[in-house]
Amino acid sequence: MMEIREAREALKLYFGYDNFRPMQEQIISCLLQKQDVVVLMPTGGGKSVCYQVPAVVMPGICVVISPLIALMKDQVEALLVNGIQAAYLNSSLTPDEQYRVENACLSGELKLLYVSPEKLLSSGFLSFLKRLQVSLFAVDEAHCISAWGHDFRPEYTQLKILKQQFPGVPMVALTATADRLTQKDIQEQLWMQDPKVFIASFDRPNINLMVKPARDRFNRITEFLDRHQGQPGIIYCLSRKGTESIADKLKRKGYRATCYHAGMSAQQRAKAQEAFLKDDVQIVCATVAFGMGIDKSNVRWVIHYNLPKNIEGYYQEIGRAGRDGAKSDALLFYSFADVMSMRSMLTEGNEKQTELQLVKLDRMQQYAEATICRRRILLQYFGETMTKNCGNCDICRNPPTSFDGTLLAQKALSAIARSQERLNMGLLTDVLRGSRSAQVLEGGYDKIKTYGAGRDTSPMDWQRYLHQMLNAGLMELAYDQNYSLKLTDQSRQVLFEGRQVQLVKFDEIKQPAEETISRARPKREQIKDALFERLRTLRKRLADEYGVPPYVVFSDSTLMEMAAEKPTNRIAMLAISGVGSLKYERYGYDFVNEIINFMTDEQEKGNKVKGATHLVTYEELKKGNNPEQIAAMRNLNPVTIYSHLATLYEQGYDDVDLYRFVTKKEYQAISKTIAGMGADAKLKDLYEALNEQYEYYKIRLSIAIYKRNGA
């Protein structure tokens, strides 16, 4: 189909990718055939391309409904850099600015227009849209439309008016997180007509999943940051006060950090976000209000200081790391106290919603306390089965070992029974540990037989074992009685009928020091890392010059590929994923030049860099030295230097003139033999076929001219 071919061409031209990701092409094909589509893809899975590419190739304008001003700004900025005309309309614009955008829409200059749901539903706006040739409606963050979703927004429920007013315009609804009930609700609320539903794999194998006990959190965070020097990341906190406190402590330690929460003024929030997007700060400590509108592809890690309310929110938040597909980390700190705090917060809503949210919190708690592969648990939640362990989570890397925990269980259950089932988890731990706390003494719990029976087990281990007993049904939690623990039928089997209990013991993984990691890495990897840092520094400088966030210039994964492949000309650079023609024209030369400079610097240091030796020759040639002088300078055979010149010419270095070293008459004679024997023939065979009249280097240079220009 011609339109799909055009879509592939647009993908390469504007986005720099040779191939679509899984499902993108099928989704785009449906939209080009004016079919409604629902897209479920994890954050970083490439949802935006699913409507941005059709918008480019379809006649007219695509209208994107997006919930956050920041998200619109980021996406429009990135589209403009890619050479796609786009704009947004929202409350941040002045009347004059809005007028200019509306005129651009009416004159057909724009391919995409981003609007908030409030703007879309404002007086007269639908009438304005009817004056345009609307090619497509894209509803981003579509889970906001469903009361069953984790981020419900009432204004989204009115979007059904689009299908009423524009029945012939196809619609795509996109979200990163939606269970089956939410998916169904999205379709019904938007009045979608027999939509095609695409559910991509929710697996983000590049994200390393970790859960650690919420003990000594701040020191653990600084240790983590020291292993991720210079890498941008987000620390999510439960409270506004928490974001400010952690950001302040980090700044005092010398880290580039800021905070973000709903209690700050719009100007303060915008300033914090802008600093993070532009890599002026490395860390943003934020409530969950931050991030939904962030399209920053080079976030390398996400830390949850507190337990999230549900798996949907958690998965969306960790998905803000590694959007470019490069390795990233997600660290969650877990404590039972967080569960209690969250339950108290959730029980303030209406009864129906409270019940739903508490069930979701229970699933989140089960994930945090998991003893099997964490990724399998996450994928199962979204209805996706994974047949083997992921190998990239803390459980897979450090499988827990089981042991006979019957005696520990009997001690805990006996203490619950002897206290008339009045102990909550914290107090039970104190009793078992023999604490002389005021609560223990006031309750008279120091008098019961099992007081101090678990002194030899640490408080943290007791917490872990009690959680396992709770999950196994050996005890119940009375939420309405100050979270006191109650015995069950299974408790009595353990206490009186000899039932055995298996518990899991975890061993902390010792993280090797950064210097050890650095020393252990092969030299070529260290060189690649050094080049990546040079390219990242260049990216930041260019981004500041052009007034865009660094990731809009090139993503981390694109820089990593550059560092690995070391492209030193236009053809090689355009082969890098994420480098389109328009971006090359704007930034490509600077990056090619930086790679050449880096490689020559490494050669001068005595470090062998694969593919760099001909570039050293090139640098000397530019200084005016001839091949013989360069050979003497570098202690190489002149034939080797001529071979370098041939390679440079083949790679597209137009300022390397081979006719300085082989005359056109000589080339014409040599090229006839090359044409007969083939450009891949051995030099020795060509030399003999030419009756040994021409030197080897002239034959090699002639092959380069022949390969590039033909006979």
Image (spheres, rainbow, N blue to C red):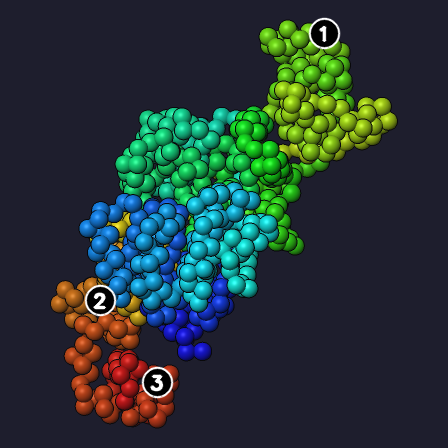
Identify the disc placed on residue 618.
Answer: 2
Q: Residue at x 25, y 56 (%)?
A: 101
Q: Residue at x 22, y 54 (%)?
A: 99
Left or right of residue 49, residue 425 in this image: right
Question: Which residue corresponds to mark 1?
Answer: 447
Left or right of residue 602, residue 469 in this image: right
Answer with the quarter of the image where residue 660 lies: bottom left
Residue 651 position within the rendered picture, expressed as x and y whole percent measured from the top left = 29, 72
| C-alpha span from label 3 to label 1 | 95 Å
Tag 3: Cα neighbours inside 10 Å, few (<14), some, or many (≥20)?
some
Question: Which residue corresponds to mark 3?
Answer: 679
Q: Nearer the viewer, residue 244 or 468?
A: 244
Name the quadrant of the C terminus.
Answer: bottom left
Instruction: Identify the mark nearer the N-term, 2 or 3.
Output: 2
Question: Nearer the viewer's eye, disc 3 or disc 1?
Answer: 1
| C-alpha span from label 2 to label 3 | 24 Å
Tag 2: Cα neighbours inside 10 Å, few (<14), some, or many (≥20)?
many
Callout 1 amino acid: Lys
Q: Nearer the viewer, residue 428 or 592?
A: 428
* Circle 2 SS class: helix
| C-alpha span from label 2 to label 1 | 86 Å
Residue 409 position within the rendered picture, expressed as x and y whole percent measured from the top left = 74, 25
Callout 3 amino acid: Ala
Tag 1: Cα neighbours inside 10 Å, few (<14), some, or many (≥20)?
few
Q: Residue at x 64, y 29 (%)?
A: 464
Callout 2 amino acid: Tyr
Q: Is residue 179 above or below residue 333?
A: below
Q: Residue at x 44, y 70 (%)?
A: 32
* Circle 1 SS class: helix
